[in-house]
Image (tube, rainbow, N blue to C red):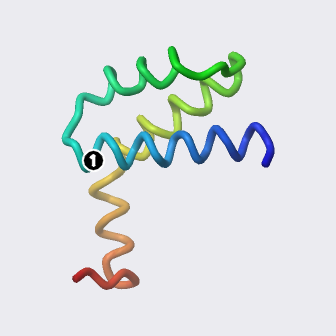
Amino acid sequence: MTIDTNVRLLAFETIQDIINDKAYSNIIINEVLSNNELNRADKSLFTELVYGTLKRKYTLDYLLKPFVQTK
């Protein structure tokens, strides 16, 4: 697994935690960045993935709704 894959997986898990636990994103992001050794580029990628996904969550939900079955 490459560093980029790890960063993307870390971002995915962080997004899940924020959404599922209704946590404050800035607090969770700071915790993750403090607990993981990432270089500057990976920290930037991680932060952008998390904040960008959360920012566009409702748009993404709307666009994906026809393709996703919920229980």
Residue 2 placement (x, y as % from top left): 80, 43
Pick whichever, 19 or 35, lies toward us. 35
Secondary structure category for the residue under label 1:
helix
Residue 15 placement (x, y as % from top left): 39, 44
Find disc 1 in the rendering and name its residue. 19
Q: What residue is at 42 percent from the left and 25 percent from the top? A: 29
Q: What residue is at 31 percent from the left and 20 percent from the top? A: 27
Query: Residue 18 appears in which quarter of the rendering?
Result: top left
> How many numbered dots are placed on residues in this image?
1
Q: Is residue 49 left or right of residue 40?
A: left
Pick whichever, 35 or 67, lies toward us. 35
Q: Is residue 45 left or right of residue 26?
A: right
Q: Quadrant of the C terminus?
A: bottom left
In this view, the residue farthest toward the right is 2
- Identify which amino acid the numbered label 1 is placed on: Ile
26 to 14, vertically: above or below: above
Q: What residue is at 24 percent from the left and 28 percent from the top? A: 24
Q: Is residue 48 left or right of residue 30?
A: right
Residue 65 placement (x, y as % from top left): 31, 77
